[in-house]
Amino acid sequence: MNVTVEMMGAARAVSGAHRVTLDLGDGSTYRDIIQKLGEMYPDLIGVIIDQDGKSLLSSILLYVNDDQWIMPGMWDQKPKDGDHLRLLGVITGG
């Protein structure tokens, strides 16, 4: 299974990558994708990816195919072959 991950904002600045295609085993989860990105781009750990290497920081969202947000409770769900993922930083404040 292949998925494309588009790095936006801080993810792009830290990794130096704009877009990466990942070749994943069948049964891979969003958590596996995050872990693989951390292995490929270790500088993402602590900035985009949590120190555990298996989840995103709360200020980072994963958007799939321009129609679904993957929330923290969904990390163990499985993407589909050909999915396009975006790592987006959220700016909050008041």
Image (cartoon, helix red, strand yellow):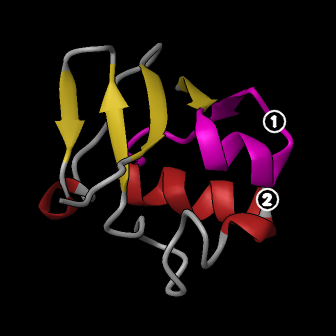
Dot placed on the residue nearer the N-terminal end, 1 or 2: 1
- Closer to the camera in the image, 88 or 36: 88
Compared with residue 86, is residue 38 higher up or lower down, i.e. above or below?
below
Q: Residue at x 66, y 54 (%)?
A: 37
Residues at marks 1 and 2 touching, judged by CB atoms closer than 8 Å: yes
- Closer to the camera in the image, 31 or 67: 67
Image label count: 2
Q: Residue at x 78, y 69 (%)?
A: 42
Q: Quadrant of the C terminus?
A: bottom left
Look at label 2 and name its amino acid: Tyr
Q: Residue at x 21, y 36 (%)?
A: 69
Q: Position of residue 20 (x, y in %)?
A: 72, 29
Compared with residue 46, is residue 36 higher up or lower down, i.e. above or below?
above
Question: SS class of the residue under badge 2?
Answer: loop
Q: Which residue is mark 2?
A: 41
Instruction: Please state the extent of the stretch shown in magenta in the rendering.
Output: 8-29
Compared with residue 53, is residue 24 higher up or lower down, i.e. above or below?
above
Alpha-carbon distance for marks 1 and 2?
9 Å
- For this view, does 45 lie left or right of residue 63? right
Question: SS class of the residue under badge 1?
Answer: loop
In the picture, residue 46 is in which quadrant? bottom right
Q: Which residue is mark 1?
A: 17
| In magenta stretch: residue 33 | no
Question: Residue placed farthest to the front in the image?
Answer: 94
Q: Residue at x 68, y 64 (%)?
A: 44
